[in-house]
Amino acid sequence: MSQAASKPASFPNGAEWVRADFHLHTNADREFQYGDDPNLYDSAYVDALDKAGIRLGVITNHNKFDFDEFRTLRSTAHKQGIALLPGVELSVGDGTNGIHTLVVFSDAWLDGGQDHINPFLTVAFEGKIPAQYEQENGRSSLSLLETIKRLEGYHRDFFLVFAHVEQNSGLWAELAGGRIEELGRNELFRRRTLGFQKVRTHDGAGRDKPCRTKVQAWLKDWYPAELEGSDPKAIDQIGKGDPCFLKLGELSFEAVKFALADPASRVATDVPKRTASHIRSLHFDGGILNGQTLHFSPELNTLIGIRGSGKSSILEAIRYVLDIPRGDKATDIKYKDELIRHTLGSGGKITLVARDTYGQDFTLSRIFRESPNVYLGGKLQPGVSIRETVLRRPIYFGQKDLSSTGDGFESDLVEKLVGEKLRPLRGEIETQRQRVRDAVARLLKLSTTAEQKREYETQLADAKFRLKKFEEYGIAPKLQKRVGFQQDSAALKRIRERVANFLSGLSAFLAENEDELRNAPTHASTQNAAFFAAYYAEYAQIIAQIDRLKQVEKDATAAAGRLDAKQAEFEAMRQGLQEEFAQIERQLAADLKQAGGTAIQPDDFLQQQQRKTKAEQMIEALTKQESQKATIRNSLLEELDKLNELWLREFNAIKEELDRVNANHTALQIGAEFKGDKEAAIDFMQQLFRGSNIREATLRAVMTDYADFGGLFKDFDQAKTKAGSTPDVFAEVFHRNLADFLIWQVPSRFVIRYRSKELKHHSLGQRASALILYVLSQRQNDVIIIDQPEDDLDNQTIYDDVIKLIRKMKPFTQFIFATHNANFPVLGDAEQVHACRYQDELVHVQSGSIDARPVQDAIINIMEGGEEAFNRRKEVYNLWKPQTSSK
């Protein structure tokens, strides 16, 4: 029977929790009762396993192994994704009643279709026939330690689980404390014993019987896994009693043994519930991973491979489809952009499936150079936030991102840690920025009022002066009728313009608000129906006013039409007098010629009269605007204050997050200062003042007393006096760029200290160690993606600090690492490993859990330099052990 036969189910997402039953009896056992159709026995037995949710079982009949029955049961179970391991409930010769010991055999005991288990049973019960020992009370002639030695003599793997340890024939019940303590010191016993079944008594204070705490005290630093088995005597008893679960990446003897070697992490009495969002899978269409789907565990995922094998390509693809910014200080931006292009190729597409905190599966897709789309149940979900609604604040660090500490690194790190949480607030900030821009535009429009007013006052004076000449010749009275008609026509046009503006504004107001107001009362209350009925009755009055306004619009539009008719009537009247006006002007021209005034033209009088009228009107309007300037400036200051309050809210939100994180860390702290980066403000000023010949020292002098440009603007008259000999130039450039200055946010300053000293003053390794521990311990990011977290870290730090923290956090956080360091997949006990290999311009990926043999082989070959190097290191380390121990 081949080993492959014991792997009936795949684990695409890596290791997962599987219910196991270590104590199963079958129809071959004398204690087992089955009275139905023998032809239906196999399927009935396997159906019972399936109904109980058991995916891995150990057949342990009393002192008996029925090879033929096991083979047919295993074959049937295999078809339903259930694995069965060969075993026996052996009653060894120790104790008053014998000790019931579950021996679990590897498939090597059945190699080539040969049964090597029964020859062992013959030796164990030497001198007895099967009828004497194939029962619950049968007893081996070998002691416990003798049994283990005999089993080892077959040179095939096995392990022991002691059945119902607290009951009769159980290990704890049959042996005294001194004997158990003695066994606990025996290396052979410890190596082969992987479980105690049916532990029920936790603390036996005041009782003579053994219990968990007493046995743990006897065994000292060693204690195996606590396991369960239903010990059924009939099919309907399969799965009864307490369950136990193993975290497995394949259904095999080797994977089970691997899990039992780490019971704290891989054995549980219940499946831990996972509520954190996580990535489920990643599929590629086009590019170097074309057609491949990678599945991810919700816990620790490691991508391994030699340099250039495609690990970073996969991580960059995840970042790309999730639309995670790299950060302003990310290294090798150009290389990583090219990496995405190379990974996807023209028209390439990534499809990612992610599960949110409610257990819903979202599909995210992104075509190269296009924006990502979000789907739920196959339907596009426009506007859904990937990094909030779908995945809770995933965080990404590329190669060297954690060890790079150049200018602005601190802000970049803070942004990665808390930026996603601030997105709604930052939306408000952008809206308020636009309001400030609009207020600046209104103010700048008024800033030319004085100049325009002076221009029109000059035109008025000139027009009055030139009109005096016409007064000397008595021209005004003779043209008064035409002048009056012109003035009346201009007045009618002004009135009509104001009517048109009113109608346009009323129409826009109704268009903007009508639908929203009419559709507002859609809420149907289940708890306060009567209240809402009365409330909506009052609300109906608001709708009634809309109807009134629409009637006003209709009536006003009709009246405007009648005004147009009146205006047309007036224009027709004026046109009818054109010949009369022309005759008057001809007669006036003749009279002026006779009087010697040939240089004076009647048309010029009309033009100057129009000029005078327009200038007077404009001066009146500009005078009113000047009176509004103070109001508009005050409005701008109010908008600035609102923007500043939002900036402060943003800072306080960041500081609150940092304080929370700092409280969990004593070694590393991040301090924050609102608008503390004055140097950034000076740099921004220099950019906008370039070409003005104003020196940096002057700009620094101007900014000395102000936290930002809003403060400078409020105190501008005083501020510009510090501009030395160029205050007018300073004022001109500042006001020309006023909107850009006022909406520019002076960055807050962040200082990272490690052990009370600024991080930048520590060594590269210390910086990287501190930062990776800080990032990993946030507990605010459901998904943490890091490309080569081991860069600049020593192996001791990786194991003592990083790996231990990851193992503690991975039940609540998904980790996706690309790494060259075997400590991450091996000591981190990776639930999913992707071994990458680049060949023929394609990336090939082999996936599986760390407990799967193919993955273990890949780790040895890729990360340990091959099996020969791996074994040689093992030999060297063993040679070092005595020296280390002697020290």
Image (spheres, grey):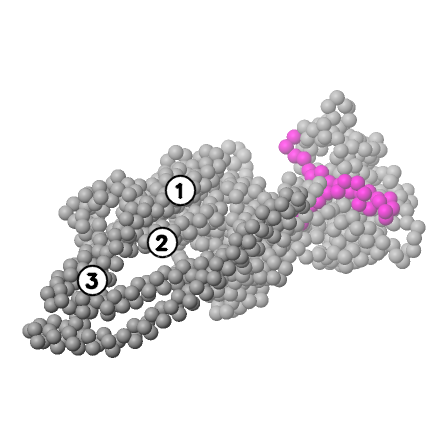
Q: Is residue 217 above or below residue 471?
A: above
Residue identifier under label 2: 438
Query: Does the image show residue 498?
Result: yes
> Residue shown at 39%/70% (left/top)?
565
Of tags 3 and 1, which is closer to the observer?
Answer: 3
- Quadrant for residue 568, please give it: bottom left
For residue 612, the mark is: 3
Q: What stretch is highlighted in magenta?
A: 220-248
Percent position of residue 338, x then y: 43, 63
In the rendered structure, which amino acid carries the disc numbered 3? Lys
User: How many residues crowd around disc 2 within 10 Å: few (fewer than 14), some, or many (20 or more)?
Assistant: some
Side of 652 where 106 appears, left or right:
right
Figure label count: 3
* 779 falls in the magenta region: no
In the rendered structure, which amino acid carries the disc numbered 2? Asp
Identify the element where label 1 is drawn: helix
> Residue shown at 32%/73% (left/top)?
573
Identify the element where label 2 is drawn: helix
Distance of mark 1 from mark 2, alpha carbons?
18 Å
- Quadrant for residue 102, please give it: top right
Q: Is the magenta stretch mostly helix, strand or loop?
A: loop
The reply to whether discs 2 and 3 touch (Cβ–Cβ < 8 Å) is: no
Distance of mark 2 from mark 3, alpha carbons?
34 Å
Distance of mark 3 from mark 1, alpha carbons?
49 Å
The reply to whether discs 3 and 1 touch (Cβ–Cβ < 8 Å) is: no
Identify the element where label 3 is drawn: helix
Residue identifier under label 1: 645
Percent position of residue 192, x then y: 70, 41
In the rendered structure, which amino acid carries the disc numbered 1? Glu
User: How many residues crowd around disc 1 within 10 Å: few (fewer than 14), some, or many (20 or more)?
Assistant: few
Query: In terms of sequence position, does the residue under pointer 2 or pointer 3 come before the other?
Result: 2
